[in-house]
Image: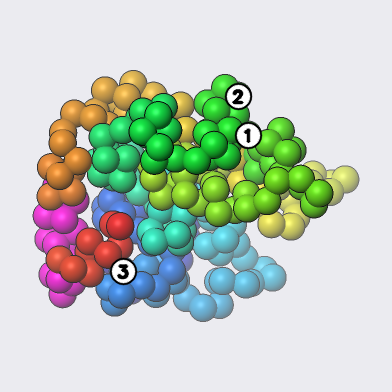
Amino acid sequence: MKQWITSCEELAQAVLKMGFLPFFQNDIKGFSIEEHISPELWFSDTADGPWEWKGPVIRGAGCAYGKLFRGKAGFISAEWYPDFANYRRKGYDFDARYDDGLAGYQEKEVYDLLAGNGSLLSKELKRLGGFHKHGKKDFDAIITRLQMQGYVVTEDFEYQRDKHGNTYGWGVARYTTPERRFGEQFINTVYLNEPQQSKERMVKHLSALLPDADEKQILKLLG
């Protein structure tokens, strides 16, 4: 990776080049967006930075985004996401995972809402799922588990607009399933290999890109 990423376009290119790109620092030194973007861009009043770039990068690079790396955010390219999902899913589609008792009922409710609606903003998903002050709890933990298991990704971020049409505030995540996000490309390849083969492919790829990282560090990041 280059020392500094200064634009949304450069970040999208870095995601495509690396295949996997965590947002925050981790055990592998230098392998994060946080370490390659000038500190002035993180909370600038005059220029967009990595927080604002997330949606455009998802759209521009055609990649997956979500809490994918040990419960923390990051990007994975469309080329590598099928291997990632296959490895994390351990070869199970969601219904099979649930039938074998490897997913809870609330996870199934959230997953079924997404699968049935195509995509939903987080606030819509919470409302439909009954997650509110006096209702169900632990939405963040549930949606994180589904992302970590390879069944949910963030499709985009949507912002509120003022009367002049300018966006403001924090972007609201729009969630979907990888099957909808990537279509036939994903559906036809996600279970093409055994999960162990997907793991070996990812480790080989990242070992070549990150020669200073050992296999233990890579596997820790891949979960």
- Residue that badge 2 annotates: 117
Percent of width and height locating residue 70: 39, 61
Q: Residue at x 18, y 68 (%)?
A: 216
User: In this figure, what is the number of numbered marks?
Assistant: 3
Secondary structure of residue under mark 2: helix
Q: Residue at x 30, y 62 (%)?
A: 221
Percent of width and height locating residue 74: 42, 56
Q: CA distance from mark 2 to mark 3?
A: 35 Å
24 is higher (above) or lower (below) than 9: below
Q: If the image is split into quadrants, where does the N terminus sit?
A: bottom left
- Residue 153 visible in the shown view: no
- Residue that badge 1 annotates: 120
Main SS of the magenta part reads helix
- Residue that badge 3 annotates: 31
* Residue type for callout 1: Leu
- Residue 204 visible in the shown view: yes
Q: Is residue 122 magenta?
A: no
- Which one is in front in this view, the residue at disc 3 or the one at disc 1? 1
Secondary structure of residue under mark 3: loop
Residue span colored magenta: 201-214
Q: CA distance from mark 3 to mark 1?
A: 31 Å
Percent of width and height locating residue 191: 23, 30
Q: Is residue 210 magenta?
A: yes
Taking depth in this image into account, of 194 and 163 the one nearest to the observer is 194
Q: Is residue 15 left or right of residue 199?
A: right
Q: Residue at x 28, y 51 (%)?
A: 19
* Residue type for callout 3: Phe
Secondary structure of residue under mark 1: strand
Q: Is the C-beta separation of discs 1 and 2 under 8 Å? A: yes
